[in-house]
Image (cartoon, rainbow, N blue to C red):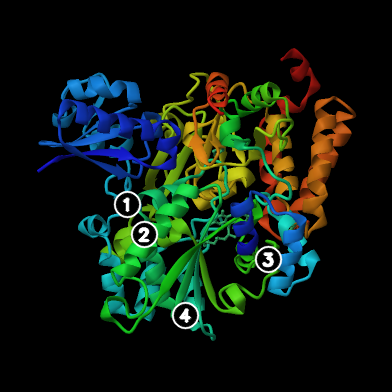
Amino acid sequence: MPALQALQAEFGFIPPEAVLAVAEALNLTRAEVHGVLTFYHDLRTEPAGRHVLKLCRAEACQSMGADALAQHTLGRVGVEWGGTTPGGGLTVEPVFCLGLCACAPSALLDGEPVARLTPERIDALLDGLA
Amino acid sequence: MTTRLFVPRDAGALAVGAEDVAGALAAGLRERGQEAEIVRTGSRGLYWLEPMVEVEAPGGRVAYGPVAAADVPGLLDAGLLAGGAHPLRLGRPEALPFLARQTRLTFARCGIIDPRSLAEYRAHGGYRGLERALSLGPVAIVDEVSRSGLRGRGGAGFPTGIKWQTVLRAEGTPKYIVCNADEGDSGTFADRMIMEGDPFLLIEGMTIAALATGASEGFVYIRSEYPHAIETMNAAINTARAAGLLGAHIQGSAFSFDMSVRGGAGSYVCGEETALLDSLEGKRGMVRARPPLPAHRGLFGKPTVMNNLLSFAAVPTILADGAEAYAAIGMGRSRGTMPIQLAGNIRHAGLFEAGFGMTLGELVYDIGGGTASGRPVRAVQAGGPLGAYFPPSLFDTPFDYEALAARDGLLGHGGLVVFDDTVDMAKQARFAMEFCAFESCGKCTPCRIGSVRGMEVIDRIVAGERTSENLVLLRDLCDTMRLGSLCALGGLTPLPVMSALTHFPEDFSTARRVAA
Ligand SMILES: Cc1cc2nc3c(=O)[nH]c(=O)nc-3n(C[C@H](O)[C@H](O)[C@H](O)COP(=O)(O)O)c2cc1C
Ligand code: SF4
Ligand code: FES
């Protein structure tokens, strides 16, 4: 797993060739490595967009309007959960709790925490992305 | 001496602009030719006031909040460095009712000290616990922890002393200490706050656990959603090692122990202890059947202490001040304090550490100030995504392991999530099933398939299709999941579902839904 995490940190995703390489290096079968890869929600088999927005969908954020916020965001960007915009600019993913539940609703934008989100704040953040 | 200003670097404070505030303060001071040191701290846990800035004024600390970067010039002009008057001035932080009503043992330093400074940790009482532990030896340490009445803070509430005793007696070397910092429950953030705000506390707690059980190596398994916690923890571990508080011959004794951080990869079920062990070994996080207990055969098949972060973090205080002082607080079989996390739609959202026994009503209304939206409270989910929803009519329930269980709920990791009257409880029940389906490790059919069926059945009930028949089906399905699941993910998902159905039946009837 640390090998896969390191690959993802380096390349942003884990290409099929890498699965074979990791399997050989660690003396595992390809199926075993594939099993690990598909189990963890964080690990990607395809590249993500240049920016990644992880919107919290869990209960504390729901209580502060996360569902409406998600609809607004997905609608504005024009993707489904997990989708990437056609130009490869932005990927929007669901996440279940970021530990920012006292400032809900919240998200991670390119790894930086953002909270007390409103549709206006999301719009401003997305407008600010290059 | 230069005046010290304190600005949190806690992820929750950063998420609402603390970095910009720190930047504006530095720039403002420069412009005015004033001198002050900006110390980055953890959070005090009064999140509705974050970013909360404090200044060490001549008469003691003075707090201001919530401060936006745009407020900074005005604050400096108002004499911030001397604790001057300003509409955002809150006064002495300890005098704020939210803090004054707490019993802070685990969170005694969080938000006050520089979390990366070992000197400050020591100056505020740190490492007194390890010092006493070194003089006591393993058997007496375990005895002290047992007498304190400490129970696991990760969910199951198992007595920590008994767990340590088992590992102390277990054959096999090396032995391991594993800290469960996966903190997957929605509505909880206490583990994160300690890692970001007082990381040496965890290092000290795990070191005492190692001394007590004869372990030589430790791991902190931190979820990937917590990049800041991972960074601060790593920095603190390096500092402790450089100071001879980790590594060979700690403090010149015969005892050696070292530890490191491992990151998770976004899986809720990896918080379950046996799945976490698999994950630490680099595999898929599959739940294992017990026995064998991790205490006998845990990480790499060796005896392993696995505890929640808050369990380890309670130990230095217990050792430093004695088991009796800790056990004197609390109610019934729940001894000591619990860092309660008030979250969701609540006015005073934050961390409230108190002895067990306050009622849900006191926590939600008196401490929490009701909803953030100003609308009536309709439900509180206690204990995370596997915990029950309580209506206000049950708000006399004390916050205590047994009292919550007696009302078909659970205390879990101490989170309370408040919902106002706009909540749709059928939707919450459906979400519980959806979450279970999404996070299931796949080993048990009732959990893997039952949860998907559960979503479909709730959809049909809500659509008004053969409602009474489908309600029976939903209850049966919950029974099957409860009885036929290996771990609490499948086994306890029925709690939120059934509590929603029992306490809020009107949300499952078509009539109300059409009216709404
Ligand atoms: C699905 C599931 C998720 C869990 N997640 C966590 C978690 O995030 N953190 C935690 O400390 N315990 C979690 N637990 C409980 C652990 O299995 C275990 O009981 C705990 O780490 C033991 O430590 P304690 O005795 O100090 O509470 C989880 C259990 C289940 C079934
Ligand atoms: S109940 Fe669900 S998560 Fe738990 S072991 Fe069974 S399939 Fe895995
Ligand atoms: S529920 Fe969204 S951050 Fe915790």
Q: Secondary structure at mark 3?
A: loop
**Letter of the chain that mark 1 sits on in the rendering:** B
Question: How many angstroms separate mark 1 from mark 2 (CA)?
Answer: 8 Å
Q: Locate residue B420: give its quadrant.
A: top right
Label 1 or label 4, whichever comes before in sequence order: 1
Residue B499's spot in the image, x, y percent? 67, 38
Question: How many angstroms separate mark 1 from mark 4 (CA)?
Answer: 31 Å
Q: Which mark is residue B236?
A: 2
* Residue B392 against residue B316 in the figure, above or below: above
Q: Quadrant of ligand 3?
A: top right
User: Residue shown at 53%/83% (left/top)?
Assistant: B170
Question: How many angstroms separate mark 4 from mark 3 (CA)?
Answer: 27 Å
Q: Which residue is mark 1?
A: B115
Q: Which sits in the foreground, B153 or A83?
A: A83
Q: Nearer the viewer, mark 2 or mark 4?
A: 2
Label 4 or label 3, whichever comes before in sequence order: 4
Task: For ligand 1, tell me if the residue under mark 2 lies within 8 Å.
Answer: no
Q: Are marks 1 and 3 on the same chain?
A: yes
- Indicate the amino acid at tag 4: Leu
Task: For ligand 1, tell me if the residue under mark 1 lies within 8 Å.
Answer: no
Q: Which sits in the foreground, B274 or B118?
A: B118
Q: Secondary structure at mark 4?
A: helix
- Indicate the amino acid at tag 2: Ala
Q: Are marks 3 and 2 on the same chain?
A: yes
Q: Which residue is mark 4?
A: B168
Residue B498's spot in the image, x, y percent? 71, 40
Q: Which sits in the foreground, B358 or A85?
A: A85
Q: Which residue is mark 3?
A: B283
Disc 1 to disc 2: CB gap under 8 Å: yes
**Letter of the chain that mark 4 sits on in the rendering:** B
